């Protein structure tokens, strides 16, 4: 799911979810910060849990990319693969920064 820095990702969301999306995305930005802190503390279990939660909720809000990255983070944490965790949290941050949301 690697993307170039200026790539934009358009996600089409059901308008019924419009009130929920800003809070959902802010929660994922907070997850990025929590994962970065967990990496500093060698806390793979926190990263695994956060990845698992993202895997379970991303697609429900229309963000398949969050689901995919959550799955990858969860697996990297299970494997203790620090470099992969760093790559995936960086991809998650870039993904969040690249979103263009269209309600339709």
Image (cartoon, rainbow, N blue to C red):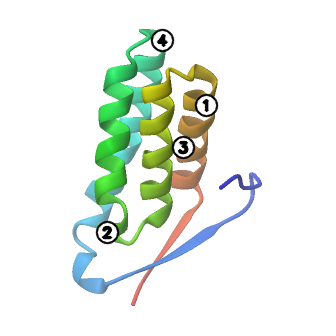
For disc 3, the marked residue is: 93
Label disc, if present, on residue 40 of the rendered structure? 4
Does residue 94 sit above or below 77 in this rendering?
below
Mark 1, secondary structure of its residue: helix
x, y percentage for residue 104?
39, 90
First of labels 4, 2 by sequence position: 4
Residue that appears at 29% across and 34% down:
49
Residue that appears at 38% across and 40% down:
51
Q: Nearer the viewer, mark 3 or mark 4?
A: 4
From the image, which quarter does the N terminus lie in? bottom right
First of labels 2, 3 by sequence position: 2
For disc 2, the marked residue is: 61
Whole-number angstrom distance, CA of label 2 to CA of label 3: 17 Å
For disc 1, the marked residue is: 84
First of labels 1, 3 by sequence position: 1
Residue 60 left/right relative to 10: left
Mark 4, secondary structure of its residue: helix
Mark 3, secondary structure of its residue: helix
């Amino acid at each position: 799911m690697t993307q170039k820095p200026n790539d934009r990702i358009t996600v089409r969301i059901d308008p019924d979810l419009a009130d929920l999306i800003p809070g959902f995305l802010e929660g994922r930005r907070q997850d990025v910060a929590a994962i970065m802190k967990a990496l500093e503390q060698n806390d793979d279990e926190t990263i695994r849990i956060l990845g698992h939660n993202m895997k379970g909720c991303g697609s429900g809000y229309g963000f398949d990319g969050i689901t995919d990255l959550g799955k990858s983070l969860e697996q990297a944490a299970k494997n203790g693969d620090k470099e992969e965790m760093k790559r995936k949290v960086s991809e998650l941050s870039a993904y969040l920064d690249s979103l263009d949301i269209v309600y339709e």
